[in-house]
Amino acid sequence: MDILDQDIKYLPGVGPTRKKMLSNELGIETYGDLLEYYPYKYVDRSKVYTIHELSGDMPFVQVVGHILSFETFAMGPRKERVVAHFTDGTGICDLTWFNGGKYAKQNYKIGTQYLVFGKPTVFNNRINFTHPDLDKVDSEQWRVENGQLTVDSGLLRMQPYYNTTDKMKKSGLNSRAIERLTKTLIEKLPPLPETLPPFICNAQHLMERDEALRTVHYPQNAKDLEHARLRLKFEELFYIQLNILRYASDQRRKYRGYVFSTVGDVFNTFYNQYLPFPLTGAQKRVIKEIRKDMGSGRQMNRLLQGDVGSGKTLVALMSMLIAIDNGYQACIMAPTEILAEQHLQTIMGFLKDMNLRVALLTGIVKGKRRQEVLDGLLDGTINILVGTHAVIEDTVQFARLGFVVVDEQHRFGVAQRAKLWSKSANPPHVLVMTATPIPRTLAMTLYGDLDVSVIDELPPGRKPVQTTHIIDTRMTSLYDGIRRQIHEGRQVYIVFPLIEESAKSDLKNLEDGFEVLKESFPEFRLSKVHGRMKPKDKEEEMQKFVRNETQILVATTVIEVGVNVPNASVMVILEAQRFGLAQLHQLRGRVGRGADQSYCILVTPLKLSEDTRKRIDIMCETNDGFRIAEADLKLRGPGDLEGTQQSGMAFDLKIADIARDGQIVQLARDEAQKIIDEDPECKSERFALLWHRLRQLRKTNINWAAIS
Ligand code: ADP
Ligand code: MG
């Protein structure tokens, strides 16, 4: 048996009670689990001072010496202050306890050698440490000669701090206790085998695994610690990447992609005759990337990122035309009915003079109409299907489905993507479009099996949206601004927050707010849309706004995704503090779609938490979706990012941090890619160590296996 699989109860200092506590509170069952329970921070204890050197303005420091005597001072009834006079031969200082003095007197012995850690202050002209940490040391470990202190290097280190729960702390299993356990464990363990091949360790200058695991719990200095952490982070990220790339390579070998070799009449006619404006450079580049994939003989799995309004739909459409040119059908899937409807209109608008059959399939297409669509798909007369999730139902069968576009990935998980594949002999090419920019490092991990294209350029003539933050007591001037815009012919969104947990009161807020707004704007017409309305009513209200029959749309975030009303120029977000950055950015993307200057107004109460203030500031500062996504990742951590839950992948990293360790992700990805390139079938003897380790990890770590 691998010693790391040993039950934690056998570790000296654990026993049945602590075993239960460790298992219940931290999920630690084995030696290996404890070894991988890494400290969350360290305090530098790599230097020891002489008492003579100390001053009151130093930060936390340590000294070494012994206690000369104890003194006790009464501080009112049943309360006392205990002072130990402490010396190292260069001077005397005091160690003071206001609480737990009795315990200190019993535990610490006069004449015994201690390493003392604390914050020095000056009291009564003497250096004083209040409630210091004391660790026993041997007298051979240090000496003072001519006022010079020499300390055994074994005393010097960075002190680790481990996360523990309140329950654990109450039973004495605090950070120091865990530290003692890991120390015992490390002393017990034989040298641990290496899990990365030497050529990678050498290329990346990585510390050996055995040394890294010991050092991360018991580092002597900051430099060693950094090396150890780098090694462990790299390893963690490397195996994740190796797993993803292995999966992608597997898929690639299992399925051949349709080869779309021609760009023919349909594409060219559209491009030369009906394209109403020149493509942006970014659109051209991405279409080229897609064409190349489609012609390569392998199945395309591409993520297309582009800010709202960057023209992704057109790119999708032109890619669909290539599929049609090669005799295949194409399909585009949107997350909501409203969006599907809008895609249909956009696409029919672009294609109105071409002889192509475009159809819609959503939950509300029923009966005879639905049957017509199903027939048309099966006999191949429908060229393009626009739809919602309804499209992946088993009853929907295509004659020759060659290309699928999935709009707004974060509502559409990996499993659903896979379901598409059952619809044709070979899997269709897949283009996933998202307007929620995902930082590169996260994309590599979340959608690691996808190639990534980016539209990083807006169509010309767009004016960046101006974003301002106002306090909710200044609504009158906001209303004046809204009135001016509407008198100039524009339209306005007003968004109320609505979250599941407080849906009832949120909804009431919206209803009340709607009445107030109606009274405030008697000269205009208002629409109201929220998630609890019947789809048909919702649709009707949306359409009124789209047709400019209403000037103000009061809504919850149902409008968040994709609606296109170029005439709308103001986005007011009430209680903006309750929205995440990604959501705010999405909402803002609803305006600024026409040639006019647009505005986004974030309304909050006066008092804001620090994080909220940062979110609001970022929004006011930039329109750049990628910068916002990076900031979001830093503020929230990857686990909270919209999309990570739905996509079925939990982040359970033990030491790496996707937000901060982007560079390491990239290095790990590159190394993993080289290996897959050399050994795509994962069976070369040369990499046996890696494949073995990967199998081991996939077996033991449930969350981790969910990546594929
Ligand atoms: P996205 O889906 O990326 O949010 P859309 O595809 O909806 O963006 O495009 C937003 C608007 O910009 C649409 O009205 C579209 O017709 C227009 N558009 C797209 N590409 C261009 C271009 N190259 N030049 C001018 N307008 C464009
Ligand atoms: Mg769109």
Image: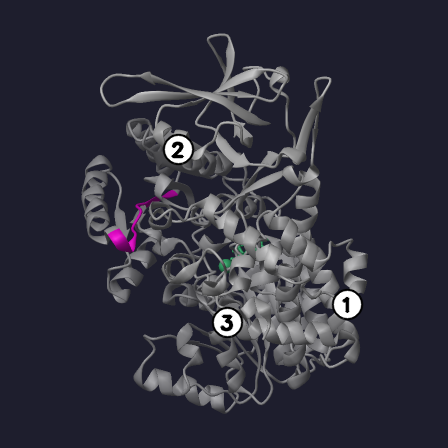
- The answer to whether residue 11 is above or below residue 125 is below
Q: Which residues are magenta?
A: 491-501
- Pinpoint residue 559: horizontal percent, then vertical percent: 37, 54
Between 19 and 330, the one lying in front of the other is: 19
Q: Secondary structure at mark 3?
A: helix
The answer, for residue 515, to whether it is visible in the render is yes
- The answer to whether residue 609 is above or below residue 558 is above
Between 339 and 234, the one lying in front of the other is: 234
- Disc 2: which residue: 106
Lower position in the chain sequence, tag 3 or tag 2:
2
Q: Is residue 226 left or right of residue 391?
A: right
Report, in whole angstroms, how far the alpha carbon at label 3 lies from the one at label 2.
Answer: 61 Å
Whether tag 1 and tag 2 are in contact, CB under 8 A, the answer is no
CB at disc 2 and ligand 1 closer than 8 Å = no
For the C terminus, the quadrant is bottom right
Three-letter residue code for mark 1: Lys
Crowdedness near tag 2: few (<14), some (14–19) or many (≥20) residues, C-alpha within 10 Å: few
Q: Secondary structure at mark 2?
A: helix
For the N terminus, the quadrant is bottom right
- Pinpoint residue 595: horizontal percent, then vertical percent: 52, 43
Report, in whole angstroms, how far the alpha carbon at label 1 lies from the one at label 2.
Answer: 61 Å
